[in-house]
Image: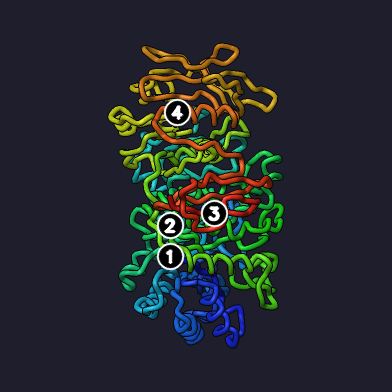
Amino acid sequence: MMQLGVCYYPEHWPESQWQSDARRMVELGMTHVRIAEFAWSRMEPRQGEYDWAWLDRAIDVLAAAGLKIVLGTPTAAPPYWLCKAMPQIMAVRADGKPWRFGSRRHYDLFSADYRRECARITTAMVERYGQHPAVVAWQTDNELACHDTVPSYSDEAKVAFQGWLAAKYGDINKLNTAWGNVFWSMEYPTFEAVDFPVQTPTDANPSHLLDFRRFLSDEVIAFHQLQADILRQHAPGRDVLHNFMGLFGAFDHYQFAKNGIDVAAWDSYPLARTETQALPEEEKARWARTGHPDISAFSHDLYRGVGRGRFWIMEQQAGPVNWAPHNPVPAPGMVRLWAWEALAHGAELVSWFRWRQAPFAQEQLHSGLNLPSDGFSPSGEESLRVGKELRQFPATASKAKAPVAMMFDYESLWYCDIQRHGASFDYQLHLLAWYSALRQLGLDIDILPRDADFTGYALIVAPTLTVADLPLVEKVSKSDALWLFGPRTGSRTRDFHIPATLPPGPLQAVMPIQVLEVESLRPSLRPQTRIAGQAGAAERWRENVRPMGEVEVLARFEDNWPALLRKGHVQYATAWFEPALLKHWLAECALEAGLEITHLGAGQRLSRRGDVTFAFNYDAQVWLAPVPMDAELLLGKAELGQGELCAWRE
């Protein structure tokens, strides 16, 4: 199904408006509404004194209009009385100072007292509304890790970290060996002596940092799971979800999802995410009003994999926002395009943020579908069009398996963040570069974890996979697909050591090479090469590789360093290739894998959902989409200006 929804805050508006709001939502084609995720102070104005009457009435009004309700647990914003009564629940910064009340996400997720309070309010909510026929889903908390709020440096967090290490290693000598603590005399006498890896004069031990990241991830998962278990107990049959964010890697979303959610929801803000990523300035300027063509699409495909085929957009940008360095107004048509793009990538639901712009507090400059004075905002008019189109759009199947699989690995992200070696090496930006190149070839992509089943894919790519372990090697050796690996693959062990046989470690069983040295490239260093007739350069990162055995060197740089190597159905790129060279190489590989490609411009994209193909134009230039002569045009027209789309069935 393809449905629309909206985020709504009845507590922000006079009760006399609720009925009109609900009626207008339905008229717009909305089926779902998310409420209550920040309303703890209204649900429980004083400890143990609940006031459900207003929420009962709000749910009744929305349900009477025919809307399905997603209830959010309010634990992202503990109220003043709780923070005053239990100051120990406030998170502690790296400098030892606690966060103060007056915003959100100020809690310490390691606090046993706060977890108990979260369990209590969640239980109270779900006991009251868990069986309500209109409440079809529950969201835990809100945007875990937002504002860099996962780490807390409290005493309680330290004890938890020390206990996590003791459970993992058992013997402090094993920890010292695993971390290489003989270096700089960093050896610890006991687990109780281990502190947080912060406030060191120079770099903290990377193994220490990596285990800290693993610990934080496990604790985020446990914090969510506490609520998820309560919700499932009292609201059986309802979907449990969390609203993740785009291009955030503070915790392992795949592990989070395994037992914790039924659907992966995420919050899509294409313009703000384009501004906040480490993209070249010319890219940010080009896509300032449209968003980078792959910023949201990448996360659609990622979260479809996280949700094992099911994902929602819980918050979809509906105009200018307030939190990026620059917050332009979207180009005409883009609010509509973003919604259809999410649906084309397999979203079951696109929920706009928010119904009405708030005239008070921190988000006054964050737009909504309606103005604070009521009536549609300029972007809200586009949501009206989407609702009309969706009502007339024929039913289509869910997203089918794509021909290309890309590996996304949260631990690889952490390794690269901890030891970038070069300021410009960004793990997610590297994956985005490969993703963009493949999308410019008209290909659909499934983004999957390293332990996924890759059977049935013709082309499998891992732009960077820091640990190449034996289970992966076994998958590669048994596969008849074409496998492509990029730089830094197999460069470390699980303990954050260089492999004894040199990188790429165990992957040498299928790609017998050794990485002898690496260099991070400043912008003025651009080693030249030629791949399959296409000249181009390396940027950001390059490796000096020694081939062994029957490895074929397909391309070399001007100084004779190998640029591209092959053995059988495995290829290894030794550098971060510039965009044109990367696209050319991937096109050659896609054709070899038997895939049909369509060369698209930088701002043109295709996506397929079931038997329907969608075309989207981000570019200022008019594009004639490749609609077959005998196709049935379901949406729009083939000639697309900026912010326009079409869909057809062959």
Q: If you read the primary sequence from the N terminus, does the residue marked by circle 2 or circle 1 appear first?
A: 1
Q: If you read the primary sequence from the N terminus, does the residue marked by circle 2 or circle 3 appear first?
A: 2
Q: Quadrant of the N terminus?
A: bottom left
User: Which amino acid type is marked by label 3?
Assistant: Cys
Disc 1 from disc 4: Cα separation = 50 Å
Mark 1, residue position: 115
Query: Can you see residue 88?
Result: no
Mark nearest the camera among 3 and 4 is: 3
Tell me residue 174's x, y (percent): 36, 34
Q: If you read the primary sequence from the N terminus, does the residue marked by circle 3 or circle 1 appear first?
A: 1
Mark nearest the camera among 2 and 4 is: 4
Question: Residue at point 63% right, 68% down?
Answer: 380
Mark 4, residue position: 589
> Taking 238 as reference, is 597 above or below it?
above
- Using residue 380 as the reference point, say whether residue 493 is left or right of it: left
Tell me residue 612's x, y (percent): 44, 53
Query: Can you see residue 355?
Result: yes
Disc 2 from disc 1: Cα separation = 27 Å
Check whether the beta carbons of the residues at disc 2 and disc 3 lie within 8 A of each other: no
Q: Which residue ends up furthest to the front in the rendered image?
A: 630
Q: Secondary structure at mark 4?
A: helix
Q: Secondary structure at mark 2?
A: strand
Q: Secondary structure at mark 1?
A: helix
